[in-house]
Image (tube, rainbow, N blue to C red):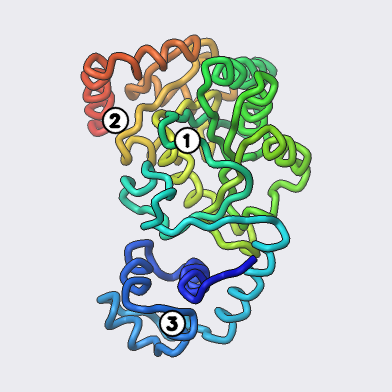
Amino acid sequence: MKISEKESLYIGLSHCYFLKGREKLVLSEKLDSLSSLVSLSIKDISEIIGRHVRPKKWDKDLLKSLTDSSIKLMSSYNIKMLYFYDSDFPPQLREIPDHPFSVFYRGTLPSTEQPMLAMVGTRRPTGDGIEQALNLGKECAEKNIPVVSGLAFGIDCFSHKGCLEGEGKTLAVLACGPEMIYPRSNKKLAANILESGGCILSEYAPGTEPLSYRFPERNRIISGLSRSVLIVEASKKSGALITADFALEQGRDVYVCSLLLNSLQNEGGKALYEQGAFAIKSIDDILHDWKYPTENNLRNNQQNMLFTNL
């Protein structure tokens, strides 16, 4: 795989996790190669981005090593990269407040014309929760709606599986490099996603480990890629509630499953419903909102008011 000087810069900047997306963009516009980046002092970087950066965050030798490693992994796993200003960069992600600087992916990105639905939830679902995730994922496939989720244990993996059973396309967003499937027990599921024409995507460069703080960060990408977010089943402390918060911040609708409102593992979903999330019985309920945006905008305003007044 041939990587240009500019692309090596983008990969290097992707490893600068102490910088925000917009700060990486500023640097990418002023520099032309990885060499020009590592030639900067931490004082230079602070002056360019307009805020102080602590010296201990800047390790030039480590950055060069990480970038070289990422380039090798990209070649080995056929990983592609999209920079924020690339024409194929997901337009939905450009809109969100804390947009990623770049994304790395394996497989095939869904068409930008296709609205996608995020389906997320607890890692410890009930039997009814599993059934709903499978059925709703399959229904999405039948309606030609790609499912976005996080490849996690529980609701996430069953949402992916349901979509695959319906011969649909599904996109898994990871909290690590796209070659590093996590959890490892979902490697077969990840392979099935790719074989079916789906996609595995991450804002993290190849070689990046799945550290705990990256999972909440990842959730904003799940909601950002999607037109709406469906919380299938979620406990009070489920990370899916973080995804719901990001969805509201990004102007996405939040839905819950009406059939699971009384589930013991769905206290978080029930709380969302009481705060204004829309309860649905089938994917058709969501498609109705997508088809009639005027009616949906009124409901969306009501939803935002309810969540804002908490």
Q: Is residue 7 above or below residue 181?
A: below
Does residue 263 appear anywhere in the picture? no
In the rendered structure, the answer to whether residue 24 lies left or right of residue 140 reads left
Q: Quadrant of residue 33?
A: bottom left
In the rendered structure, the answer to whether residue 266 lies left or right of residue 162 reads left
Give amino acid for label 2: Phe
Residue in the image at 36% along x and 57% along y = 85
Give amino acid for label 3: Leu
Q: Is residue 48 above or below residue 222?
A: below
Q: Which residue is mark 2?
A: 307
Residue 155's spot in the image, x, y percent? 62, 29
Q: Which residue is mark 1?
A: 111
Mark 3 vs mark 1: give the one in front.
1
Question: Camera-side residue: 235 or 201?
Answer: 201
Q: Which mark is residue 67?
A: none
Distance, label 3 to label 2, CA atoms, is 43 Å
The tag earlier along the polypeptide, 3 or 2, is 3
Mark 2 vs mark 1: give the one in front.
1
Give amino acid for label 1: Ser
Distance, label 2 to label 1, CA atoms, is 32 Å
Q: Which residue is mark 3?
A: 37
Does residue 106 appear anywhere in the picture? yes
